[in-house]
Image (spheres, helix red, strand yellow):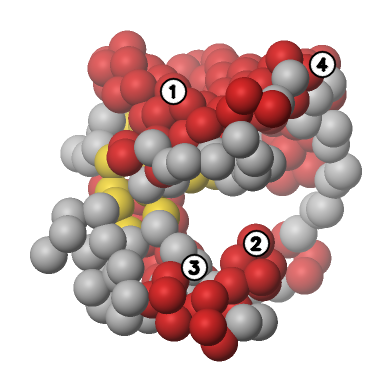
Amino acid sequence: MDPENIRPIQCDMLDPEAVANLPQLAIDAFGGLDIVVNNAGIAPAGKFLEQDDQLWNEVMAINVTAPAILSRAAGRHMAEQGSGKIINIASTSGILGKAALVAYSSSKGAMLQFTKALAAEWAPLNIQVNAIAPGAFETDAQSAVLESPEILKRRLSKIPARRMGDSEEMATLVCYLASGLSNFVTGSVFVIDGGESSKL
């Protein structure tokens, strides 16, 4: 990608006004807006009985409310131009739930239903809304697992493919959903987890 076509912008996802302004910043920089990928998220681990309301609210604000605000702000422009793509990065935890990640699992489950409901509402506007539910990927978020051979072995034993996903595999799926090839695909959830959630 040409570096001239990249505009990094810092945004506090807990600031609703700042989030709502993001689409206009993109429009001002590039003259339009066709694709939104809602990828920001936090996943604080811990026993639910020991967590407070502030943590719950923060997870919901970043993982659910911010994507909703951003999608609505972008959707107004997309509706006017007659096309657009919203891609929500959820998680297999939003499908199955995961102990010690109750708030995170709940927020990602909400994102899946947000995706389906919004897809139904915006399909007549020619705006496609889809979600990706990844399992374990080799990212910084998995550093504690990747750095311990013993923990990594246990983690991989739960994945039928016996490996974690690569970022390029995720990128390819995102590119498909962002392209014209997916114009008849909306309201779908694409699970990419090496078979873990299906228990092959």
Of the numbered discs 3 and 1, the one sitting upstream in the chain is 1
Amino acid type shown at disc 4: Glu
Q: Position of residue 139 (x, y in %)?
A: 61, 69
Residue type pointed to by label 2: Ala
Q: Does label 4 or label 1 sit earlier along the sequence?
A: 4
Could you say where residue 73 lies in the image, as x and y percent from the top left?
63, 18
Name the residue beneath numbered marker 2. 141
Q: Which mark is residue 57?
A: none
Neighbours of disc 4 within 10 Å: few (<14), some (14-19), many (20+): few
Q: Quadrant of residue 58?
A: top right
Tell me which residue sits at (70%, 26%) in the image. 51
Q: Residue furthest left?
A: 200
User: Alpha-carbon distance for marks 4 and 2?
Assistant: 28 Å
* Mark 4 element type: helix
Residue corresponding to mark 1? 110
Task: Give the foreground label among 4 and 1.
Answer: 1
- Which-is-in-front pick, marks 4 and 3? 3
Q: Position of residue 163 (x, y in %)?
A: 38, 80
Give the residue number, with chain letter if any, for mark 4: 17
